[in-house]
Amino acid sequence: MATKRETPLLDELMTGPWPSFVKEIKLSADDGKDAASDLLGVLEKSYNERIGHWKHGGIVGVMGYGGGVIGRYNDLPEEFPAVAHFHTIRVNQPSGWFYTADVLRKICDIWDKHGSGITNMHGSTGDMVLLGCNTDALEPVFAELTEIGFDLGGSGSDMRTPSCCCGEARCEWACYDTMAACHDITMHFQDELHRPAFPYKWKFKFSGCSNDCVASIARSDCSVIGTWSDDIQVDDAAIKEYADGKQVDIAQDVVRLCPTGCISFDGSKLAIDNADCVRCMHCINVMPKALAPGKERGATILIGAKAPIIGGALLASVMVPFLPMEAPYDDLKELAEAIWDLWGEHGKNRERVGEFIQRIGLGNFLEQIGLEPTPEMVAHPRTNPYIFFELGEEDGEE
Amino acid sequence: MSANVDDVAGDMFDMVKEYHGKKNLKALDLSKAMIIKYGAEECDKKLCKLAIRQLIDSGKCTYSYVGGSYIVLPPDS
Ligand code: SF4
Ligand code: SF4
């Protein structure tokens, strides 16, 4: 029976309207999990003292892999022996997070047997996160996970576990097969996933359209966002139904909110100037029965987003405005490898690729990876009057 | 000088031993040093990757995380 602990501060976290992690940990402690009980104890102590009691990192992992396990140790092992080691294991999730109940049960059984039984479904990168086990448990967990077809995800300075929206599996707006692309990239770059060799982490995220359900534009070093290169498909009869049925105020909710003002509506017919459409999905989201992405579909590749950890947050910038997304995705792979070569050579330790681009300048970056500058790479017109030109151009030379 | 995986892995191991306790080396540091030693013609990044894999899979070296991922000697060596 796990020690019953008094946790008045943690208990306050259970009083709000939302589900609380405290409640879940307490359930585990009530089930007799010593690690859950000691975890509550160390948390309550930290809240009281306002001091963290965790150290992380070091040499901990499974044989052959440099990622997938985050070493965590408690600095009060005598007081909280069941969480003296509390390593986190990241498990590569299936594309689109599709599971069967049976496989989830098997994963939970493995974790109940060897670890704390506490999970986080899912981490911000997308992995299943198994929270808390001893160093001795790592190899058995890994062996049993691989037995049921799972592998560890990434951590440290490697390619982190790629993730994707459910795409064509469930969503009519997917402009490419996100799950296939995510799976292919994961399998192709196994070495980069398991053997850290970059200056810092690199994330791929795949969204089927610019609704960007995996937040790739804000969270991934390489975001692959579905788009189309022809015209939005318009069903005039369905537009009329929306207008007649007064389900949508088309002038207010669609025309006025189009970010580039490229839609007009005369009361019955909608016209879109597709040359000015930036494929934001707004009009399609509002009138899904009448509008749909075009038929020539692919993806826009953006580079350089990150959440704030060391430096501030960055949004990604467009590198390739339109790329057809067909297996084996050679263009995407070649682009990633060209960037890794340059960033690997010149990036500083713990410098994300977005920060690297800011440091060396987008112009230099493009030149080095062999991409031609295009207007789509420019977020807004420049606000200073300086113009850079090559000396040769002044003399009329090429 | 021609290079094979065993030679490169051996040289990388010597380098990790030499720097042990003085400086943590990243996979890239090892690769760069080998490319300089053997020349890019004889030893490319692909060969370096294979050598690192051999080094880790053999248990002679392991990964550690100290703010970044490094290749180090195993704790019991
Ligand atoms: S990102 Fe687009 S395609 Fe993917 S699930 Fe969301 S709406 Fe659908
Ligand atoms: S997708 Fe966005 S930019 Fe294009 S027409 Fe619709 S609202 Fe306007």
Image: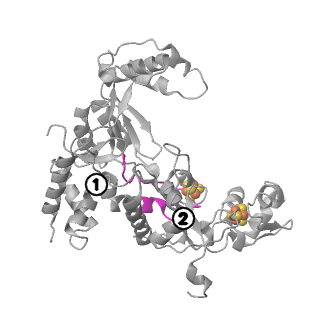
Q: Secondary structure at mark 2?
A: helix
Q: How many numbered circles does the render carry? A: 2
Residue A200 shown in magenta: no
Compared across the picture, whether A129 is left or right of A253 comes to left
Q: Which residue is mark 2?
A: A362
Q: In terms of depth relative to the viewer, which is nearer, A345 or A277?
A: A345
- Give the answer, above or below, for where A395 lies relative to A12: below
Specify the amino acid type for callout 2: Leu
Which residue is denoted by mark 1 in the rendering? Answer: B27
Query: Is A140 situated above or below B7?
Result: above
Residue at the (22%, 49%) spot, across then down: A64
- Asked if residue A151 is positioned above or below residue A268 in the image, the reply reads above
How far across and how far down the image is residue A342, in percent?
A: 40, 64
Residues in magenta, as a range: A155-182
Which quadrant does ligand 2 occupy?
A: bottom right
Q: Residue at x 37, y 58 (%)?
A: A186
Mark 1 crowdedness (10 Å alpha carbons): few <14, some 14-19, many ≥20: many
Looking at the image, which residue is at 26% across and 71% down? B40
Q: Main secondary structure of the magenta part?
A: loop
